[in-house]
Image: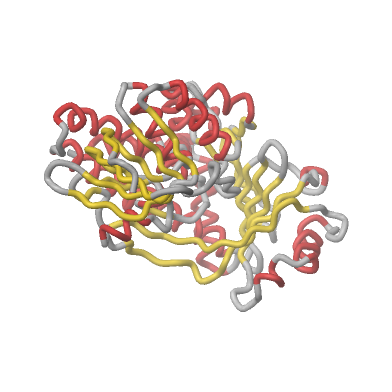
Amino acid sequence: MSAKERCQVVIVGAGPVGTTMATLLAKQGADVIVLEANEDCAQDLRASTFHPPTLEMLDEVDVTPMLLARGLKAPVYHWRDRQSGDVISFDLSEIADVTRYPFRIQCEQYHLSRALAEGLSRYPSAQVRFNHRLLSFEQDEQGVTVFAESPTAIQEIRCDFLIAADGANSVVRKWLGIEFDGFTYPERFLCLSTDEDLTAYLENLAYVNYVSDPEEWLVLLKVPSVWRVLLPTDGAASDDDLRSDERKNAIFERLIGKGAEVKTFHRTLYRVHQRVAKSFLEGRVMLIGDAAHLNNPLGGFGMNSGLHDAFNLFEKLQPALRSGKPNGSLELFDRQRRQVTHAFTQAQTIENMEFIRGGAGEGHKRRRAAMMAIRDDDERRRAYLLKQAMFESLEKARAIN
């Protein structure tokens, strides 16, 4: 085992949430080490939406200009009914008085994490260590001892605080024994990416479209290089079947009237969860991002809420870093982010899923009528836009003492 090192903060995970947290700390001169089990930042194809308040926050780590340059501006998004062809449109330009970014940016999340990981090299107090896997840790009254496996050795790092940004299967959360309550949707989800121009086949298509249908609902999402098509799959089918050309051809045949000619670049299967950790704080160890909470992708809240965790924690961690020990500010982080996750992110994504999965029956008709009533009422529409853009959740968090 190599000699014990010392730093103020160890962050596990070099995804967008972990690298953002590290950059915030490094800009303040904190000694921070990021451990990432993989050889590079993960190229996750799911998260790609950056909401207006998130873009404002990311200005603090100097990456919003990069996202604006790389990404697509999407002020308009649609809730669509596949059977009737009805389109319920919402335009974030209506809240331009509350944000300098009245749109979503559609850009793959790995552009953010890679840019921040590279940028950390500018700070002498920060390091990103790829191919370093967390093995275990021990915390006591004075700090946390972290054990990590590198390609050549077991490393021991002593730190004041440990931050888990290591995703849905968080090793840190598991070692702490924190319950991860919630449920997993029974169907698996298939994400297909294609450079086929879907706007040539589907009229009035926005960059972000949630398409309701009782047989096969869809999310159609444009990022700079491709369209992504997300849909539920047959739970009894094999992986090979779900990723097969036959399956792909049938999906696009139903969608745009042709299938075999459509080229796809990715065919990714994954499960979707609605889960929240019982606590985001245990002594000197904190959970943020997917390590703390998971939700379905409808609304694009997952990565954004994780980034909001990081900015909230950064603010609350400052007095603890100065004193070298936990205090009430970290407990406030736990209360604010956990309560808002339950009250907003979980509730809203579950509601969004109910709408898009409905597609038929009286329940869906009532939900669609309610959505159209929101669209047609100026006051309610504004409130809805602020909620979907995640401004409401941030206000609710700040109100929690």
| Residue occupying image coordinates x 49% and y 35% | 51
Q: In which quarter of the image is residue 156?
A: top left
Look at the picture and state if 59 lies above or below 20: above
Look at the picture and state if 170 lies above or below 203: below
In this rendering, would 40 be left or right of 305? right
Question: Which residue is nearer to you in this view: 400 or 85?
Answer: 400
Q: Give the image location of residue 148, x and y in percent.
A: 37, 49
For this orientation, the residue located farthest to the right is 261
Quarter of the image containing the C terminus?
Answer: top left
| Residue occupying image coordinates x 56% and y 63% | 357
In this rendering, would 207 be left or right of 52? right
| Whether residue 352 is visible | yes
| Whether residue 302 is visible | no
Question: Which residue is nearer to you in this view: 53 or 392?
Answer: 53
Q: Give the image location of residue 335, x and y in percent.
A: 22, 45
Q: Give the image location of residue 178, x and y in percent.
A: 27, 60
Question: Which residue is nearer to you in this view: 160 or 276?
Answer: 160
In this rendering, would 78 be left or right of 256? left
In this rendering, would 49 be left or right of 312? right
Q: In which quarter of the image is residue 387?
A: top left
